[in-house]
């Protein structure tokens, strides 16, 4: 199944908690189909985002981090979908922080910390804020 993308279709009252675990490690797109003409794009994960995530432990400069940040953000968001935290990822991000924080100007540090905090927040709390379903959180009526 190399380089193939999985599609998740979620109905009107669907929830991603069933499909999310199967899509954290492969390219995929989620779409909620409300009716024939009304669809909502959900979380996705591309092959490039997976490759960026796989480089997380080898990032050693602010430039590498900034070049990969958008892909890292998307990958971590997709991989944390429905989870309540991931200690190994938190450790990897802490190590990244240690490698990068003391290397640049004050403004670069501020920018880096803002971006790093967003990634760490997803790693520590999981990701539950999507328009499609609420994977990992029970719906209340």
Image: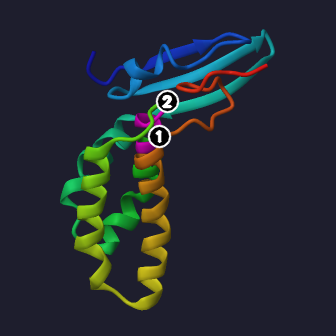
Whether 77 is among the magenta residues is: yes
- Asked whether, in this view, residue 24 is left or right of residue 12, the answer is left
On the image, which quarter does residue 105 sit in? Answer: bottom left
- Pointer 1 and pointer 2: residues touching (CB < 8 Å)? yes
Quadrant containing the C terminus in the rendered view: top right
Write the residue at 52% across / 39% down. 127
Furthest toward the bottom, the residue is 105
Rendering coords of residue 9 (x, y %): 59, 13
Rendering coords of residue 58 (x, y %): 18, 58
Q: Which residue is mark 2?
A: 82
Q: First in sequence, mark 1 or 2: give its number.
A: 2
Q: Judge whether 107 appears above or below 36 on screen.
A: below
Q: Which residue is mark 1?
A: 126
- Asked whether, in this view, residue 55 is left or right of residue 86, the answer is left
Q: Residues within 10 Å of mark 1 (few under 14, many from 20)?
A: many
Q: Judge whether 91 appears above or below 28 on screen.
A: below
Write the residue at 37% across / 57% down. 68
The front one of 16 and 35 is: 16
Rounded to the nearest whole Å, what is the CA distance between mark 1 and mark 2? 6 Å
Q: Find the magenta span and give its range.
A: 76-82
Q: Judge whether 44 appears above or below 34 on screen.
A: below
Write the residue at 51% across / 25% down. 29
Rendering coords of residue 97 (x, y %): 30, 68
């Amino acid at each position: 199944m190399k380089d193939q993308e999985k599609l998740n279709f979620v109905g009107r009252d669907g929830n991603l908690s069933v499909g999310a675990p199967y899509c954290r490690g492969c390219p995929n797109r989620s779409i909620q189909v409300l009716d024939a003409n009304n669809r909502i794009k959900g979380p996705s994960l591309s092959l490039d985002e997976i490759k960026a995530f796989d480089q997380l432990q080898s990032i050693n400069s602010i430039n590498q981090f900034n070049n990969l940040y958008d892909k890292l953000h998307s990958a971590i968001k997709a991989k944390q979908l429905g989870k309540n935290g991931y200690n190994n990822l938190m450790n990897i991000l802490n190590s990244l922080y240690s490698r990068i924080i003391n290397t640049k100007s004050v403004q670069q540090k501020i920018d880096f910390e803002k971006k790093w905090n967003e990634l760490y927040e997803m790693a520590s709390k999981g990701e539950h804020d999507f328009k499609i379903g609420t994977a990992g959180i029970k719906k209340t009526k």
